[in-house]
Amino acid sequence: MRKELEKNPKPDVREKVMEHGFSFLFDEELVMLILGSGTRQLPVDLMAEKIVRVLDDCDFEEAVENLLRVKGVGQGKALAVAAALEFGRRRSCHLRAPVKTPRDIVPFLKNYAVCEKEHFLLVTLNGGHEIIQIHVITVGTLNRTLIHPREVFTAAMRDNAAAIIVSHNHPSGNCEPSEEDLEITEVLEKVSVIMGIELLDHVIVSRENYFSFVENKLIHGKESLKGIN
């Protein structure tokens, strides 16, 4: 059996994730995908078990140092695991973060501000205006043909959102809204009333700045976001 695992160190893991998604996998199986392979002395499944035990027993800051103590785990594998943890932390740090003012959402959008193409984003929020998820709706030049309310509100309903914030980046660095930005926001605001999912704001971000439609009174009647001035 051990020889079979050495020859095929990731039995069915790739097939499982392709069929069922990443949430179907155990932690050890996720680590197996990160590692890719084990060593002759330590097959990848056993290495993954040891790594998960180490991570369960230490803080992130000590992860690399402790992983290097595991026989068979070299610097490359230790750094790969730590990098995956940090990447996941950055991508999920917005979850359940409260949004009370337009400024609160900006830090969670900054990684898109540096993109060379425009990304139109949807931030879904629960009844307490805590972030549920951030979705990329479309990538490319922003216009009314690419941004359709159907895509925006389908994702919002899937998240069971009580409210939404939309956002996009301006690669030029100028955060002033274009005529198309204004038109799209007006359409989305009208649909939000019909759908019963409040549009709290439209935030345009760049590397150095941001523009909030609420702060500039371009979305009306949004009493939910206070303290914006």
Image (cartoon, rainbow, N blue to C red):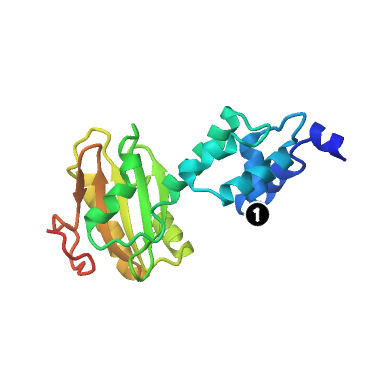
**Where does the image place residue 63, in percent across and percent down from the top left?**
52, 41
Residue 45 is drawn in which quadrant? Answer: top right
Q: Secondary structure at mark 1?
A: helix
- Residue 142 visible, this orientation: no
Residue 157 is drawn in which quadrant? Answer: bottom left
**Where does the image place residue 202, in percent across and percent down from the top left?**
26, 54
Determine whether, in the image, residue 203 is placed left or right of residue 162: left
Residue at mark 1: 24
Determine whether, in the image, residue 47 is placed left or right of residue 81: right
Residue at 68% in and 46% down: 49
Residue at 81% in and 32% down: 7
Determine whether, in the image, residue 42 is placed left or right of residue 216: right
**Where does the image place residue 190, in percent across and percent down from the top left?**
28, 64
- Residue 35 visible, this orientation: yes
Give whichever of 151, 145 is nearer the camera: 151
The N terminus lies in quadrant = top right
Q: Amino acid at mark 1?
A: Phe
Give whichever of 142, 225 is nearer the camera: 225
User: Mark 1 packing: few (<14 Cα in 10 Å), some, or many (20+)?
Assistant: few
Q: Relative to 7, does residue 55 appear above or below in the rendering? A: below
